[in-house]
Image (spheres, grey):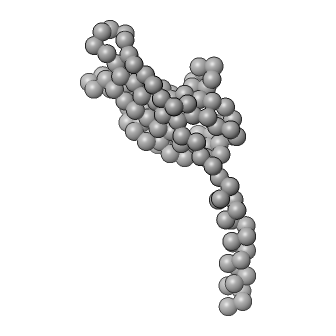
Amino acid sequence: MRIYLQAMLFVTATLLPQAASADVATGTGSMIKKDAYGTESSWGRALIVPRDGTVVRVMYGTYGFTIRDAEGRAVGDFLAPEMAVGTRLTAGEYRIEPYVCAKHRHHHVEVTVAY
Protein backbone atom coordinates (compact mmCIF):
# COMPACT_ATOMS: atom_id res chain seq x y z
CA MET A 1 0.00 0.00 0.00
CA ARG A 2 2.82 2.35 0.88
CA ILE A 3 4.51 1.77 -2.51
CA TYR A 4 1.21 2.52 -4.25
CA LEU A 5 0.85 5.84 -2.41
CA GLN A 6 4.44 6.80 -3.20
CA ALA A 7 3.89 5.99 -6.87
CA MET A 8 0.69 8.07 -6.98
CA LEU A 9 2.45 10.98 -5.31
CA PHE A 10 5.30 10.76 -7.82
CA VAL A 11 2.92 10.75 -10.79
CA THR A 12 0.93 13.66 -9.39
CA ALA A 13 4.04 15.71 -8.66
CA THR A 14 5.73 15.13 -12.04
CA LEU A 15 3.05 14.72 -14.69
CA LEU A 16 0.18 16.99 -13.68
CA PRO A 17 2.15 20.27 -13.64
CA GLN A 18 3.35 19.56 -17.18
CA ALA A 19 -0.16 18.85 -18.43
CA ALA A 20 -1.53 21.93 -16.70
CA SER A 21 1.12 24.20 -18.24
CA ALA A 22 0.19 23.41 -21.86
CA ASP A 23 -1.67 26.20 -23.63
CA VAL A 24 -3.40 26.13 -26.99
CA ALA A 25 -4.12 28.60 -29.78
CA THR A 26 -6.66 28.15 -32.57
CA GLY A 27 -6.69 29.84 -35.96
CA THR A 28 -9.40 29.65 -38.62
CA GLY A 29 -9.68 30.19 -42.33
CA SER A 30 -12.73 30.36 -44.60
CA MET A 31 -13.06 30.94 -48.32
CA ILE A 32 -15.94 31.25 -50.79
CA LYS A 33 -15.34 31.34 -54.55
CA LYS A 34 -17.78 33.53 -56.49
CA ASP A 35 -19.41 32.93 -59.86
CA ALA A 36 -17.42 35.74 -61.47
CA TYR A 37 -14.07 34.34 -62.59
CA GLY A 38 -11.25 34.88 -60.10
CA THR A 39 -13.30 36.52 -57.37
CA GLU A 40 -13.48 35.19 -53.85
CA SER A 41 -14.17 36.13 -50.25
CA SER A 42 -11.92 34.95 -47.48
CA TRP A 43 -11.74 35.59 -43.75
CA GLY A 44 -10.53 33.97 -40.57
CA ARG A 45 -8.77 34.38 -37.27
CA ALA A 46 -4.96 34.46 -37.24
CA LEU A 47 -3.17 31.57 -35.56
CA ILE A 48 -0.89 33.30 -33.05
CA VAL A 49 1.65 30.93 -31.48
CA PRO A 50 3.58 32.68 -28.65
CA ARG A 51 6.07 29.80 -28.23
CA ASP A 52 7.13 26.91 -30.46
CA GLY A 53 4.29 24.41 -30.66
CA THR A 54 2.73 21.43 -32.38
CA VAL A 55 -0.52 21.10 -34.34
CA VAL A 56 -2.77 18.90 -32.19
CA ARG A 57 -6.15 19.22 -33.94
CA VAL A 58 -7.59 20.14 -37.33
CA MET A 59 -11.30 20.43 -37.96
CA TYR A 60 -13.10 20.71 -41.30
CA GLY A 61 -9.96 20.41 -43.44
CA THR A 62 -11.70 18.01 -45.83
CA TYR A 63 -10.32 19.47 -49.09
CA GLY A 64 -6.93 20.43 -47.67
CA PHE A 65 -5.31 23.71 -46.68
CA THR A 66 -2.07 25.67 -46.46
CA ILE A 67 -0.56 27.27 -43.35
CA ARG A 68 1.25 30.54 -44.19
CA ASP A 69 3.58 32.56 -41.99
CA ALA A 70 3.40 36.35 -41.49
CA GLU A 71 5.42 36.92 -44.70
CA GLY A 72 3.01 34.78 -46.72
CA ARG A 73 5.39 31.83 -47.16
CA ALA A 74 3.80 28.36 -47.06
CA VAL A 75 5.07 26.45 -44.03
CA GLY A 76 2.82 23.47 -44.71
CA ASP A 77 0.52 22.19 -47.46
CA PHE A 78 -1.89 19.47 -46.38
CA LEU A 79 -4.34 17.46 -48.48
CA ALA A 80 -6.06 15.90 -45.46
CA PRO A 81 -6.53 17.18 -41.88
CA GLU A 82 -4.68 14.27 -40.28
CA MET A 83 -1.55 15.11 -42.30
CA ALA A 84 -1.13 18.35 -40.33
CA VAL A 85 -1.39 16.85 -36.84
CA GLY A 86 2.09 16.68 -35.34
CA THR A 87 3.48 19.51 -37.49
CA ARG A 88 5.86 21.74 -35.50
CA LEU A 89 5.41 25.51 -35.78
CA THR A 90 7.85 28.09 -34.48
CA ALA A 91 6.58 31.05 -32.48
CA GLY A 92 4.84 33.56 -34.73
CA GLU A 93 1.64 34.50 -36.51
CA TYR A 94 0.13 32.27 -39.17
CA ARG A 95 -2.91 32.30 -41.42
CA ILE A 96 -4.92 29.32 -42.59
CA GLU A 97 -5.80 29.14 -46.29
CA PRO A 98 -8.33 26.41 -47.14
CA TYR A 99 -8.50 24.67 -50.50
CA VAL A 100 -11.93 24.88 -52.06
CA CYS A 101 -14.08 22.16 -53.58
CA ALA A 102 -14.83 22.94 -57.24
CA LYS A 103 -18.45 21.86 -56.85
CA HIS A 104 -19.40 23.59 -53.59
CA ARG A 105 -16.87 26.45 -53.84
CA HIS A 106 -16.58 27.10 -50.12
CA HIS A 107 -14.60 25.71 -47.20
CA HIS A 108 -13.68 26.35 -43.56
CA VAL A 109 -10.70 25.06 -41.52
CA GLU A 110 -9.76 25.30 -37.82
CA VAL A 111 -6.22 24.50 -36.68
CA THR A 112 -5.25 24.18 -33.00
CA VAL A 113 -1.64 24.30 -31.77
CA ALA A 114 -0.42 23.30 -28.30
CA TYR A 115 2.61 25.18 -27.05
The image shows residue 30 at horizontal and vertical percentages of 42, 28
**As drawn, is 58 to the left or to the right of 8?**
left
Rendered-image quadrant of the N terminus: bottom right
Residue 100 is at least partly visible in this image: yes
- Say which residue appears at 40% left-offset and 39% top-offset: 60
Which residue corresponds to the image point at 58% horizontal and 42% vertical from the top-left? Answer: 25
Residue beneath the point at 40% across and 24% down = 31
Quarter of the rendering containing residue 94:
top right
Q: Quadrant of residue 80?
A: top left
Q: Nearer the viewer, residue 112 or 62?
A: 112
Q: Position of residue 102 (x, y in %)?
A: 30, 22
Rendered view: 17 above or below 112: below
* Residue ranking furthest to the bottom: 1
Looking at the image, residue 12 sits to the left or right of residue 84; the answer is: right
Residue 4 occupies quadrant? bottom right
Q: Is residue 31 above or below residue 36?
A: below
Which of the two residues, 106 or 41, is positioned nearer the viewer here?
41
